[in-house]
Each structure stands twice: as C-alpha cells, then as structure tokens.
Image (cartoon, rainbow, N blue to C red):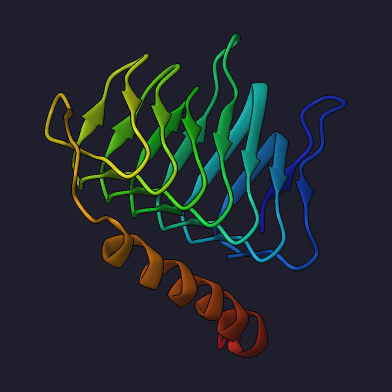
Amino acid sequence: MPIYALGEHRPEIHPEAWVMPEAVIIGRVRVGARATIWSGAVLRGDDNEIVVGEESSIQDNCVLHVTDDFATVVGRRCTIGHSAHLEGCTIEDEALVGSGSVVLHEAIIGARALVGAGAVVPGRMHVPPGAMALGTPAKIREGADTDPLILPGIEKYIQRGRTYREHLRLIE
C-alpha cells in the first residue's frame, strides 16, 4: 500500500488497523486501532493533520484532506461512506457520513448524527448529535432515530476488516 512520508511527517497507523493495498496515505495521518481504510481512499495530511479514530471505516474512494487552518478529525466508530469527501471538518463518535457526500471546512457532525448520501454540508455548519443532514445544501432534520441506521454498519465493517486481514490474498 502506498504510505508516504512528506518531509518530516510520517503517517502513524495502528498495527490493528486494516488498510487496503490500493489506499493512499500521505503525511500527517493517524489511524486508530481496528479502523479500516478501503480501496481507492486517499488521506492526504499535508498542511494539517488527519485523525481517524479507532474502529472507524473510511470506505472505498473517499478523499480526506485538510486546510492550512483546519485538521480533519474522524472520531471513534464512525462510518465514512463510499466516495465521500471530508475537508477540514470534525466527525464526532459513531456518526455516519453517507456515500458521495461532502463535508467542508469547520463543519461539525455531532455524535450519532447522519449525513445523507450525496448531501453537501457547507463550511461551519453544525449537525447536532443524533440529527440528520440531508440534501444540497444540507438541511438539518432532528428527532430521527439514527441508531438503527448507524450502529449495525459499524460492527459490520469492524468484522469485515478482520476478515480481510485474515483472508485477503492477491491471486495475480
């Protein structure tokens, strides 16, 4: 897997994390225990830091980037759906960012909040814990029970990481 130092900055990947060989990790990136980084994901910590908390899943083709002023922080047990783009934002514990969505500078996605597939969360928006952010630009919907939409996927990707670690093999 391509893991690159950038100057003096080297990625720190916990030995219990699973990173697919086709993912790219550059510079100031920290990946926690049992986190999974899937094919085509690019985590580019050049101007600031990217943190991926333990047991979080960064799925296929995600782009995580930073700005000069803002790190990108993904909390514990988060799911970042396929082809999502995170830049200079904070995703709190057990949140789900849906496939194809975008979360921009200084946005905060609260614990157990959900960003719907294809949504765009503009800079500085705060999605309260347990709320949903849906649409383009995202609008907040509170009062939904996000647990059944979030929690089963967390466990599924933790187990999937174990399975890949033990059984994935290149045939050619």
Horizontal side, residue 81 vs residue 87: left or right: left
| Image vertical order of residue 46 relative to residue 17, above or below | above
Q: Residue at x 27, y 55 (%)?
A: 146
Task: Specify the quadrant that holds the N terminus.
Answer: bottom right
Q: Among all residues in the image, which is located at the extreme front?
A: 143
Measured from the top left, where is residue 149 in percent x and y?
27, 63
Q: Residue at x 44, y 43 (%)?
A: 111
Res 8 quadrant in image? top right
Q: Among all residues in the image, which is located at the extreme right?
A: 8
Q: Residue at x 67, y 52 (%)?
A: 2
Residue 170 visible in the shown view: no
Please state which of residues 10 and 15 is positioned toward the viewer in this rendering: 15
Measured from the top left, where is residue 86 in percent x and y?
42, 33
Please state which of residues 98 and 93 is positioned toward the viewer in this rendering: 93
Q: Among all residues in the image, which is located at the extreme top?
A: 69
Residue 26 visible in the shown view: yes
Q: Residue at x 65, y 56 (%)?
A: 54
Measured from the top left, where is residue 161 in percent x and y?
57, 75
Task: Specify the quadrant that holds the C terminus.
Answer: bottom right
| Image vertical order of residue 132 relative to residue 67, above or below | below
